Image (cartoon, rainbow, N blue to C red):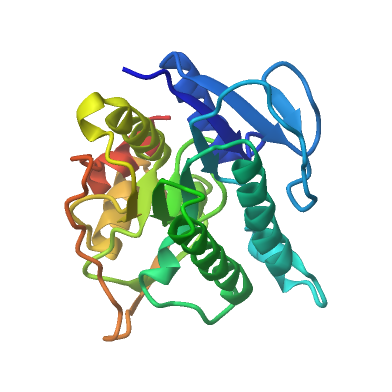
């Protein structure tokens, strides 16, 4: 078996820091990338700027979780955050080429699988589309040998960014009114534990001698397995929390798209929606 080492961007953020923690506990050598500071096992690097540094150690994988992603960061007039996200990807590819890093895991967005580009997240989604295209081009040029794109929905877990499930639970605990656009089939979230475990599974899968296939490109929709009827689940959570919140429900438009999860190459099983939410409630 070959030794695994990974360069992880976004280690100051929620996902990147949790991925780094799990990989380190699993005895995988990790180097983080941080815009803010440099210390042991952390490279100080603003990804929007080129980095011509030549590493004196071997890196097998890049895990690119860094991105400007908050809706508020894209709602400001005349911002160039879409360009910054794309520039981060370009600079990371150039750095990988210089340092012969041949494999990459890219954190993208599930909105692309839903073909949901418009709205308040439009520029963020466009930055992810363009980044995926740039990575695919690098793969075709054989800069990368193995590429795994993770299309990620809302993430659950302590410290996660705001999203529908997280915000709803917070409001239930505060006895605030809840407004739900109901969906019969809803699985548009994943627990951070699953996301981290999947990254570890990918790295160890390709570290096995029988899986040394040189070139591979895959895309995974990181959705919880099964699904929930959202209004019914929120009512159950309300009861469990002894909340006094008033719940108002409107029906979801008929054209809502539900994505059936396909079996992935790594035989990774995502936890069910109920398990993911119950785990969040216990944290």
Q: Is residue 27 left or right of residue 58?
A: left
Residue that appears at 49% across and 50% down: 106
**In the rendered view of the protein, which quadrant contains the C terminus?**
top left
Residue 206 appears in view: yes
Identify the image quadrant of the N terminus.
top left
Q: Quadrant of residue 255?
A: bottom left
In front of the other: 31 or 71: 31
Give the answer, above or below, for where 245 lies relative to 82: above
Q: Which one is in front, 253 or 202?
A: 202
Q: Residue furthest bottom?
A: 254
Q: Nearer the viewer, residue 133 or 213?
A: 213
Q: Position of residue 35 (x, y in %)?
A: 77, 39
The residue shown at (64%, 48%) is 92
Which residue is at the front of the view, 55 or 71?
A: 55
Q: Is residue 32 left or right of residue 277?
A: right
Q: Residue at x 44, y 13 (%)?
A: 27
Residue 153 pos. (x, y %): 42, 57
> Is residue 50 placed above or below 125 in the rendered structure?
above
Q: Position of residue 87 (x, y in %)?
A: 70, 60
| Left or right side of 68 for 250 | left
Report whether residue 169 is seen: no
Total marks in image? 0
Residue sitting at x 40%, y 77%: 115
Q: Is residue 44 above or below residue 109?
A: above
Q: Position of residue 16 (x, y in %)?
A: 56, 37
Q: Quadrant of residue 213?
A: top left
Task: Give the vertical position of 169 relative to 115 (above or below).
Answer: above
């Amino acid at each position: 078996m070959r030794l695994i080492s990974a360069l992880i961007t976004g280690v100051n953020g929620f996902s990147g820091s949790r991925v780094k923690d799990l990989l380190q506990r699993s005895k995988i050598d990790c180097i983080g990338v941080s815009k803010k500071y440099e210390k042991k096992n952390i490279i100080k690097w603003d990804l929007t700027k080129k980095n011509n540094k030549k590493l004196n150690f071997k890196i097998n994988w890049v895990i690119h979780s860094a991105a400007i992603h908050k809706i508020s960061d894209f709602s400001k007039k005349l911002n160039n955050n879409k360009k910054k996200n794309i520039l981060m990807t370009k600079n990371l590819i150039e750095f990988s080429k210089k340092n012969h890093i041949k494999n990459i895991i890219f954190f993208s967005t599930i909105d692309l699988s839903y073909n949901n580009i418009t709205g308040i997240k439009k520029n963020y989604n466009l930055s992810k589309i363009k980044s995926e295209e740039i990575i695919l081009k690098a793969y075709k040029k054989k800069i990368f040998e193995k590429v795994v794109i993770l299309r990620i929905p809302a993430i659950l877990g302590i410290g996660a960014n705001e999203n529908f499930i997280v915000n709803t639970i917070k409001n239930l605990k505060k006895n605030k009114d809840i407004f739900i656009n109901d969906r019969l089939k809803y699985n548009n979230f994943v627990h951070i534990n699953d996301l981290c475990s999947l990254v570890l599974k990918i790295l160890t899968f390709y570290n096995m001698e029988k899986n040394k296939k040189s070139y591979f490109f895959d895309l995974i929709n990181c959705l919880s397995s099964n699904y929930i009827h959202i209004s019914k689940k929120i009512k159950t959570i309300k009861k469990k929390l002894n909340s006094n919140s008033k719940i108002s429900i409107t029906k979801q438009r008929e054209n809502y798209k539900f994505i059936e999860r396909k079996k992935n190459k790594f035989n990774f099983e995502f936890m069910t929606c109920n398990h993911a939410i119950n785990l969040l409630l216990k944290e």
